[in-house]
Image (cartoon, rainbow, N blue to C red):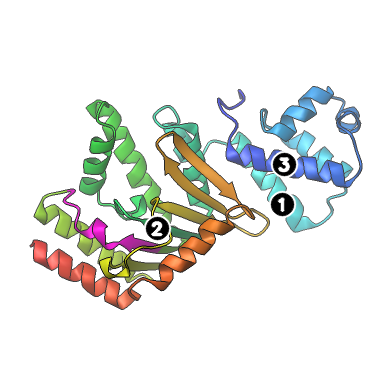
Amino acid sequence: MAAPKWVTLRAQWLGQQLRELRDANGLLLRDAAEYLQRDPSTVSRFESGEYPIRRPDMLALLDLYGVADGRRREDLMKLSQEVWQKGWWDGYADEVAGAFIDYVWLESRARRIRTFDNTLLLGLFQTEHYARAVITAAEFDADTEQINRWVALRMARQEVLQSENPPHVLSIVDEAVLHRKVLGARDLSVQFQRLVELAARPNIEIRVLPFSAGAHASPTGAFRILTMEERFPEVAYAETPKGAIYVETPDNRRLVQAYDELRKLTLDPKESADLISATAEDLR
């Protein structure tokens, strides 16, 4: 299997942990390379995430670094396998930026997803009609076939909400989102009714940030915070006109604080559901 076209986030995480383990053992690149009977440049590429490490080399390094804890070994081996193995999302890698494929991988592994949206609804919550409308508007120079692929990716991402162990999604929606005429009245009503149905699930909390809240902690726009399994960093994600950015623990503290401040200004879940239901009813 060829090396990935870009250095994925999962490869970077694995490489960082391998580097930290080597440093903790007081070993140099040449020491690890000699143990593996490889060139030091190869071990360096493992640690930079430029090239995925194969299972025999991974097991050998865990032994060299004295990683005896069973759970720790299992976590690292699983991550190394995910660097090599393709997930369903990788089939869309040619259609979207590599950075977004990293986001889809994070989304598929996250145990908690906190979101703030001030322009459009969260992709995980969108109906196909809503998704098609917003993707077509944003990707105004794409052809129909390309739009169809992007819509298919967004719909496939929603399967995570149907999984055996779905993430806990905490979503803050600016009231402005409820008034944006993305679709015709009937289709928009269906979208908002879906939102109400999702909010009734035990793992999903949707809160509306009302106009009456005034100025707030995120005037620059939407962002997400994804909390992974233990031992992985918490990651904040935001899109910009020049591409997506990822901010890991502890550097994401400002966004975590902003989320907490926003939440203080929201309607509670019941009040939010009532407002969304009333909006859907008004559109019928």
Q: Mark 3 points at which residue?
A: 16
In the rendered structure, the answer to whether residue 57 lies left or right of residue 215 reads right
Q: Does 196 sit above or below residue 238?
A: below
Give the mark, 2 or 1, whose residue is nearer the N terminus: 1
Please state which of residues 33 and 176 is positioned toward the viewer in this rendering: 176
Amino acid tagged 3: Gln
Residue 3: x percent and y percent? 62, 25
In the rendered structure, the answer to whether residue 66 lies left or right of residue 20 reads right
Residue 231: x percent and y percent? 68, 56
Quadrant, the C terminus? bottom left
Q: Name the residue under label 2.
A: 116
The disc at residue 20 is: none
Residue under the image location 21 percent in, 61 percent down: 192
| SS category of the residue bearing label 2 | strand
Give the mark, 2 or 3, whose residue is nearer the N terminus: 3
Viewer-nearest of discs 3 and 1: 3
Amino acid tagged 2: Phe
Range covered by the magenta-colored residues: 171-182
Residue under the image location 70 percent in, 45 percent down: 77
Q: Does 254 sit above or below residue 103?
A: below
Q: Can residue 111 be seen in this view?
A: no
Q: Mark 1 points at which residue?
A: 74
Give the mark, 3 or 1, whose residue is nearer the N terminus: 3
The residues bearing labels 2 and 1 have C-alpha atoms spaced at a distance of 34 Å
Residue 212: x percent and y percent? 27, 70
The residues bearing labels 3 and 1 have C-alpha atoms spaced at a distance of 17 Å
Q: Which quarter of the figure has residue 36?
A: top right
Residue 43: x percent and y percent? 79, 29
